[in-house]
Image (spheres, rainbow, N blue to C red):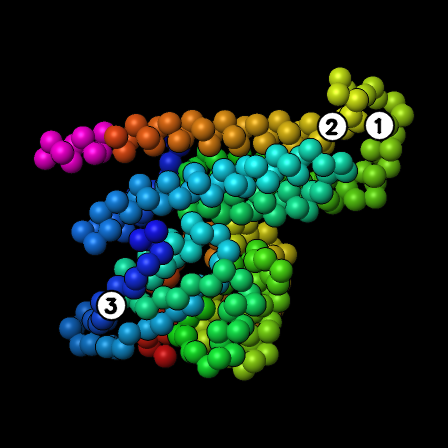
């Protein structure tokens, strides 16, 4: 789990007590339920043309907030990367609209017939990284909680 | 879900190093955040500190609650909220004459966001996640006020 979770996860464990013996597992379960919704929203937003970078940024802001709340370090870092791409894109503003227009003339369409820009590709790739870290962490946490339950039964 | 239900009714006393009580009152807090994970976590942290916490998911709900006359010692407010963001909500809360301690929280602490939040009227601004350590100095100020 080292590298995947930060100090915040320990804080969650400190909040667990006799009154809330499964607090950590419950909040992690809640995170994965809620983040599935966010992932779906982001996927839909990434399919829209033109990309709404403000909406994408808002979704990823939420994702980063909830990831950091459970100590999901790598997921949080990938969310930061994604937001930096969005922020750079939003700052380019008019200049990038011109860049996109130029792309439409010079670059080929992709196989689906969609216009492809560097920024769009970067966003999609970064989002794939977010999802990958999200999935890896879920598997590790499932194993962790399984072991914790077994240890509890043994005690 | 049981995480979202109930409030611990622990009464928290603060003790100075020499054993004298600073305050025996139960503090109250309002959490204004649309993110359910943050709602659960912040409420749990507050309750672990002996604070009675209430949660709302939007700026509008916060304003309606405060307008109804309910008072809170502390308001923890997220920057990103549906319809009316945290900055605008803070501005409106302060315009209502509410002087509760306000702590702004956000997932990304860009300087421009921090400045906007402080200018709107929050007393302090932190980057998520909220932790007992980050909350400690705020609570000390409230209890000593």
The residue at the point 25 percent across, 30 percent down is A146
For disc 1, the chain is: A
Instruction: Between residue B8 and residue B119, name the one nearer to us.
Output: B8
Which quarter shows the C terminus of chain B? bottom left
Q: Is residue A142 above or below residue B132?
A: above
Residue A103's disc is 1
Majority SS type along the magenta span: helix
Q: Secondary structure at mark 2?
A: helix
Q: Which residue is mark 2?
A: A118
Q: CA distance from mark 3 to mark 2?
A: 55 Å
Q: Is residue A101 above or below residue A61?
A: above
Residue A99 appears left or right of B58: right
Whether residue A35 can be seen here: yes
Q: Which residues are magenta?
A: A147-155
Q: Which residue is mark 3?
A: B9
Q: Which-is-in-front pick, marks 3 and 2? A: 3
Badge 2 vs badge 1, beta-carbon distance below 8 Å: yes
For disc 2, the chain is: A
Q: Is residue A146 within the magenta segment?
A: no
Q: Is residue B37 above or below residue B135?
A: above
The residue at the point 37 percent across, 27 percent down is A139
In the rendered image, residues at marks 1 and 3 fall on the same chain:
no
The residue at the point 36 percent across, 56 percent down is B4
């Amino acid at each position: 789990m080292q590298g995947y979770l930060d100090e915040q996860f320990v804080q969650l464990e400190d909040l667990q007590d006799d009154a809330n013996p499964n607090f950590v597992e419950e909040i992690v379960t809640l995170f994965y339920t809620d983040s599935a919704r966010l992932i779906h929203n982001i996927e839909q937003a990434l399919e829209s043309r033109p990309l709404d970078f403000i909406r994408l940024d808002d979704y990823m802001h939420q994702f980063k907030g909830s990831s950091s709340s459970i100590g999901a370090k790598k997921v949080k870092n990938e969310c930061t990367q994604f937001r930096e791409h969005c922020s750079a894109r939003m700052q380019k503003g008019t200049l990038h609209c011109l860049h996109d227009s130029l792309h439409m003339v010079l670059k080929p369409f992709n196989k689906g017939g969609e216009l492809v820009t560097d920024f769009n590709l970067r966003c999609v790739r970064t989002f794939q990284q977010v999802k990958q870290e999200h999935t890896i962490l879920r598997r590790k946490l499932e194993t962790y909680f399984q072991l914790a339950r077994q240890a509890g039964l043994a005690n | 879900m049981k995480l979202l239900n109930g409030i611990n009714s622990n009464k928290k006393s603060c003790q100075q190093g020499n054993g004298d009580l600073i305050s025996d009152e139960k503090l109250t807090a309002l959490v204004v955040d649309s993110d359910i994970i943050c709602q659960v976590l912040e409420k749990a942290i507050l309750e672990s500190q002996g604070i009675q916490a209430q949660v709302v998911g939007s700026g509008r709900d916060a304003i309606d609650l405060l307008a109804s006359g309910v008072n809170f010692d502390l308001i923890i407010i997220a920057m990103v909220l549906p319809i009316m963001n945290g900055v605008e909500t803070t501005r409106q809360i302060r315009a209502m004459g509410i002087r509760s301690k306000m702590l702004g929280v956000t997932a990304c602490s860009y300087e421009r966001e921090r400045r906007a939040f402080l200018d709107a009227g929050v007393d302090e601004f932190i980057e998520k996640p909220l932790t007992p350590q980050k909350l400690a100095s705020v609570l000390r100020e409230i209890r000593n006020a």
